[in-house]
Amino acid sequence: MTDQYVLTLSCPDKQGIVHAVSSYLFMTGCNIEDSQQFGDHDTGLFFMRVHFSAEALNAEKLRASFAAVGDSFQMDWQIHLADEKMRIVLMVSKFGHCLNDLLFRARTGALPVEIAAVVSNHTEFAELVSSYNIPFHHIPVPKENKAEAEAQLLALVREENVELVVLARYMQVLSDDLCTALSGRIINIHHSFLPSFKGAKPYHQAHARGVKLIGATAHYVTADLDEGPIIEQEVERVGHEVTPQQLVAVGRDVECQALARAVKWHSERRVLLNGRRTVVFA
């Protein structure tokens, strides 16, 4: 039986990395299906994603035998089954367009994920989530006890073996401790007007300024609000005749598109962190 795997790695850039990886795969009887690599001259780091097939070797054996190669090049590496769906948690507040989009994409197979649960600080979308037979967790976030709400979220992540948390318009600022605990494992979506149009009704502010491009940015969450490494961005051109309500509709569409692509690429192990930036093998 032939299984499909994905190897991802990053390490200090030097000669021989590609040769070492390809030689290891050849010597272990694996076949390379696809390979992408990038050397960043600014950071001096090398990044690689290899999709390969293997017979009579499971993931544990592959990881054990590859460890020597990883150690010799100081690699940060992972090997995963290519068809293994990533378990994720979606978080939402009162705007449900991204939630609805991700639920539908996951149901139809457009996203290679398994949604373990949906978490919200409100109850508006409990019925929608229930229609997909997905557990819905209402976790209020009182100002006086925000730490307890985050502790419940972390417990859920651990209990459900969740690899990724997606903020699908979850309108709560996460604590530094939570951002650290889930570093590289939380994706957020926001309108790209930040920081120019902060506060309430950003699309109305944009309309008042005659904005010609509507944008959205999907990024990893860090302690620096809305400044985490960017994964994907989407834009749509608009004319002078559009109303604030039409801008909101366009904004919802681009938010859904950018977030869905970011979640898909992350779940396919295509995104590697490169300091404050990302390498995306899309």
Image (cartoon, helix red, strand yellow):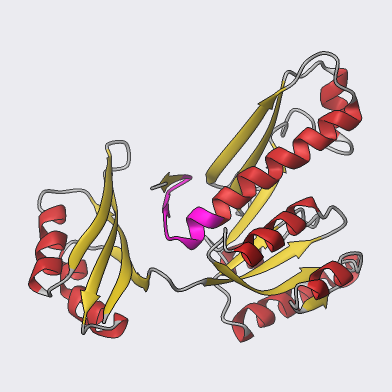
- Give the residue at x 50% y 72%: 85
| Residue 271 inside the magenta-drawn segment | yes
Rendered view: 106 above or below 276: below
Looking at the image, residue 85 sits to the left or right of residue 235; the answer is left
In this orientation, does residue 175 appear? no
Horizontal side of residue 120 vs 109, given as left or right: right
On screen, 152 above or below 129? below
Residue 136 rendering spot, x and y as whole percentages = 80, 76
Residue placed most toward the observer, 266 or 274: 266
Residue that extends furthest to the top in the rendered view of this protein: 240
Point 68% across, 81% down: residue:
156
Query: Where on the picture, by quarter, is residue 108?
Result: bottom right
- Residue 97 pos. (x, y %): 79, 51
Image: magenta residue range:
264-277
Which residue appears at 72% of the width and 34% of the height? 194
The answer to whether residue 66 is visible is yes
Quarter the N terminus occupies: bottom left
Please identify the quarter of the rendering in which residue 187 is found: bottom right
- x, y percent for residue 88: 61, 70
Q: Is residue 70 left or right of residue 246?
A: left
Residue 140 counted in the magenta span? no
Left or right for 63, reference 203: left
Q: Nearer the viewer, residue 19 or 6?
A: 6
Q: Position of residue 86 (x, y in %)?
A: 52, 70
Identify which residue is drawn at 59% across, 48% down: 219
Q: How many marks?
A: 0
> Which quarter of the figure has residue 221?
bottom right
